Image (cartoon, helix red, strand yellow):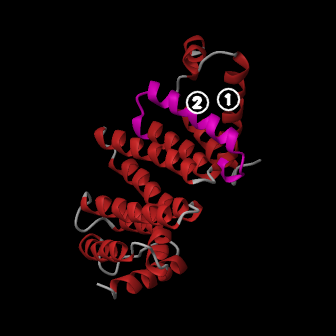
């Protein structure tokens, strides 16, 4: 496993060395840092995060989650809350990737919900937005994993509710960057909600109408809906589909 450029590769390798030293010491992260105070350094935490990201990309989920946990502890000790929240977010992404049942998706969702609450309380609004976006996206996976049509519908309705709550708590209009982030994550559940027939169709349609109104208020007109032009067009098509029901 390697990183994509020389500078990042060096950080990756330093992260590997630090993680190996901590795990082979048999100590907790706190104890190891107490005996190696020179390692209590933001650069070390950044190196560990690089390793965690690259491990996640490579599908090495155990390594990614271990690195995220150790990096998160180090960042908390350093008082770098935003970085610690980002590490926690990465660990929860591993939980999402491992999940195959509604129960497992529910556990991951609860983790993101708690992360959003903590980040909001700490004033880390960007990290809170990421956590809520993962909650919204997770409603798609939970709905698809559900074997029971009623449970599948509950998941998608909850995802639409999460999207409404996130939009309601956001500036009107949102920044283009935040709007694109949120719509990228919301695409899958919106697409599913507006293209499938549900047992509680009236409830889903009502939520979609509310979402259409909230998007009109909070998403900047003519703003890109994704950093990917193809995804931008797909999101626009989905918005047009369910907005026509309003």
Q: Which residue is mark 2?
A: 70
Observer-nearest of 62 and 57? 62
Range of magenta residues: 56-82
Mark drawn on residue 19: 1
Residues at marks 2 and 1 touching, judged by CB atoms closer than 8 Å? yes
Residue 196 in the image, given as x and y percentages of width and height: 49, 78
Q: CA distance from mark 2 to mark 1?
A: 8 Å
Q: Is residue 242 left or right of residue 50?
A: left
Q: How many marks?
A: 2
Residue 166 in the image, given as x and y percentages of width and height: 32, 59
In this view, the residue farthest toward the top is: 35
In this view, the residue farthest toward the right is: 1
Query: Which residue is located at x 45 percent, y 29 percent?
Result: 76
Q: Is residue 67 magenta?
A: yes
- Packing grade of label 2 (10 A; few <14, some 14-19, many >=20) is many
Observer-nearest of 34 and 113? 113
Observer-nearest of 146 and 26? 146
Asked if residue 228 is positioned above or below residue 130 in the image, the reply reads below
């Amino acid at each position: 496993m390697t990183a994509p450029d020389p500078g990042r590769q060096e950080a990756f390798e330093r992260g590997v060395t630090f993680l190996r030293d901590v795990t082979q010491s048999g100590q907790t992260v706190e104890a190891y840092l107490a005996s190696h105070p020179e390692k209590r350094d933001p650069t070390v935490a950044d190196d560990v995060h690089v390793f965690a990201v690259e491990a996640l990309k490579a599908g090495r989920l155990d390594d990614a989650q271990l690195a995220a946990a150790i990096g998160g502890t180090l960042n908390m000790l350093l008082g770098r809350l935003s970085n610690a929240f980002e590490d926690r977010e990465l660990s929860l992404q591993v939980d999402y990737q491992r999940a195959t049942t509604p129960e497992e998706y529910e556990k991951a969702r609860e983790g993101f919900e708690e992360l959003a609450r903590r980040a909001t309380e700490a004033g880390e609004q960007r990290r809170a937005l990421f956590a809520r976006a993962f909650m919204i996206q997770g409603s798609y996976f939970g709905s698809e994993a559900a074997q029971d049509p009623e449970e599948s519908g509950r998941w998608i309705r909850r995802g639409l509710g999460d999207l409404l709550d996130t939009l309601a708590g956001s500036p009107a209009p949102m920044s283009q960057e935040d709007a694109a982030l949120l719509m990228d994550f919301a695409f899958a559940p919106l697409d599913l909600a507006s293209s499938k027939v549900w047992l509680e169709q009236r409830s889903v349609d009502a939520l979609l109408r509310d979402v259409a109104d909230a998007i009109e208020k909070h998403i900047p007109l003519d703003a890109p809906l994704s950093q990917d032009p193809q995804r931008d067009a797909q999101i626009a098509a989905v918005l047009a589909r369910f907005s026509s029901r309003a």
